[in-house]
Image (cartoon, grey):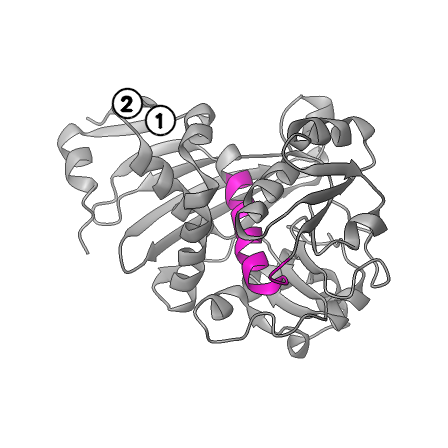
Amino acid sequence: MSNSLYSTARQDNQTTIVPSTDIEAAVEMADLVPAIEAAFAAYENDTAQMPPKSYIDLPQHNGDFRSMPAYLETDDWEASGIKWVNVHPDNPDEFDLPTVMGTLVYTDPESGFPLAVMDATTLTMKRTGAAAAVATDHLAVEDASSLGIIGAGVQSYTQLEAISQVRPIESVVVSDLDDDRVQRFIDTFGDEFDVRAGTISEAAQCDVLSTVTPVEDPIVTLDDLGEHTHVNAMGADAEGKQELHTEVIREATLVIDDFEQTTHSGEINVPWSTGEIDESDIDAELGEIVVGNAPGREDLSGITVFDSTGLAIQDIAAARIVYESLGDDSGYRLEMV
């Protein structure tokens, strides 16, 4: 497949540097959600390559780095690149920086030319929300109108922005230990949704629940959840993290994004390592459901859980949207010599 974007980049010998402000303007959830769904489909159809996420652990700084390369091909386009991302939970308090930051090199697959280097912090937040929306679309009840969010950090914003694209969300319950964060969230969305602060249990009773916390001790029990709640477990992205009690994972219909990553560092990593769950507890990967190789929600009752670790294919699909939206006056250009 020839990349139609490449000819211009090769002639100009230019790599575009894309700041976060341009990414914020370029990425619309209405475009991003179907692009992320297409990435899951490509992965399931074996037209994507995604080596396991590699980690550099830095306990002395309470953080880590991850490298995430990927290539994917759909019926309409192909894309490739690599993201370098960190997770440092102390950043907001100590450095006034986001917990998660990243840089992505978007590369032409035909030649290897670096088409763009872009800030991936905003990109990561948006594609994470979009992944939750794809899972919600396949696993939540059709008329889901209430969304609970546990954790009112930056990731919570894109959860609501994305999930409201696929379900008629009217009311939102947000729970966080930091009252100021909760108030900022309410102030941001209060004119568009019925938003209120609540307990973990009140948030978990909603039709859809997204958990976006860095906790290692589980905070959501089976009794907290409603009879048909769909849970997007988004916070666990490293060994030892777990937001949902193991009984939730065992009782729910469990859908994961990638076997290698979730068993290593996803929501299921702790009970998997202790032998409390095994492969029989995993019902499907999301890509299987997207392409119709496995069923999504089949009835109105029952809890569903999506274990999301974040995949490089999502980042590259999002980066393609950014790159294609760039005008001549966007970003900065580096001349290749």
Q: Main secondary structure of the magenta part?
A: helix
Q: Which residue is mark 1?
A: 17
In the image, residue 188 above or below residue 163:
above
Quadrant location, the C terminus: top left
Give how far apart the Cα atoms at labels 2 and 1 are.
Answer: 6 Å
Q: Are marks 2 and 1 in contact (CB under 8 Å)?
A: yes
In the image, residue 94 above or below residue 127:
above
Question: x%, y% of residue 185?
Answer: 70, 31
| Magenta stretch bounds | 124-143
Question: x%, y% of residue 211?
Answer: 71, 49
Residue 125 magenta-drawn? yes
Residue in the picture at 50% in, 69% down = 289
Query: 43 or 231, which is in the foreground?
Result: 231
Residue 50, visible in the rendered structure: no
Question: x%, y% of residue 9?
Answer: 20, 34
Q: Amino acid at mark 1?
A: Ile
Residue 23, visible in the rendered structure: yes
Residue in the picture at 27% in, 23% down = 334
Sequence-wise first label, 2 or 1: 1
Residue in the picture at 60% in, 55% down = 308
Which element type, helix, strand or loop, lies under badge 2? strand
The count of marks equals 2
Residue 224 magenta-drawn? no
In the image, residue 146 above or below residue 322:
below
Question: x%, y% of residue 204?
Answer: 78, 53
Q: Which residue is mark 2?
A: 333
In the picture, the disc for residue 182 is none
